[in-house]
Image (cartoon, rainbow, N blue to C red):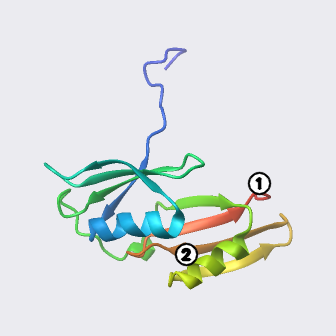
Amino acid sequence: MSGTNKMEIRPRETVILASSFSELVDWYCNVLGFTVTQLHEEEYHYCNLETPTGIQIGIADAKEMGVVPQDRSQNTVLLQIQVANVQELFTHLQQAGCKTTFGPSFDQQGQFWFGGFSDLEGNPIWVVDENCP
């Protein structure tokens, strides 16, 4: 690369391939507060979503992308988010009927709260508070 910007990498949204496209879009909007910024439904189904704090994700129809999702709890790539109060988020998630996978727990050494939950289709999401290094 020797000082050139030919390979400059810029951020784009993380994409989630959905078995039930509309239902997963609705879940991210209703449970985590994302809003739809773009929706494509003609040639293919793809939705751009964003939170007020700038987190961007995309949701695509897995079948249209030629993917048959397996056990999503075994995903090697996951979404990680940060909130001010992990316990409050977990209370909200439980009220919304979401599946938590671990936590909320407190890391004594690092002095931060953390936990994990899954979206409507079982994709893992990790959450930490603002004290996490």
Give the quarter of the image for residue 54.
Answer: top right
Q: Nearer the viewer, residue 66 or 40?
A: 40
| Kind of residue sitting beneath label 1 | Pro
Q: Could you say where residue 109 lies in the image, as x and y percent from the top left? A: 86, 67
Circle on res. 68: none
> What residue is disc 1 on?
133
Q: Secondary structure at mark 1?
A: loop
Q: Is residue 36 above or below residue 99?
A: above
Q: Quadrant of the C terminus?
A: bottom right
Q: Secondary structure at mark 2?
A: strand
> Which residue lies at the image location 37% right of the left edge and 75% below the top edge?
121
Instruction: Please indicate, yes or no, whether residue 75 appears anywhere in the rendered image.
Output: no
How far apart are labels 1 and 2 at the CA level?
A: 20 Å
**Residue bearing mark 2:** 117
Position in image of residue 3 (x %, y %):
55, 14
Q: How many badges with numbers are in the image?
A: 2
Relative to 57, 44 lies left or right: left
Vertical placement of 14 versus 2: above or below?
A: below
Q: What residue is at 27 percent from the left and 52 percent from the top?
A: 46
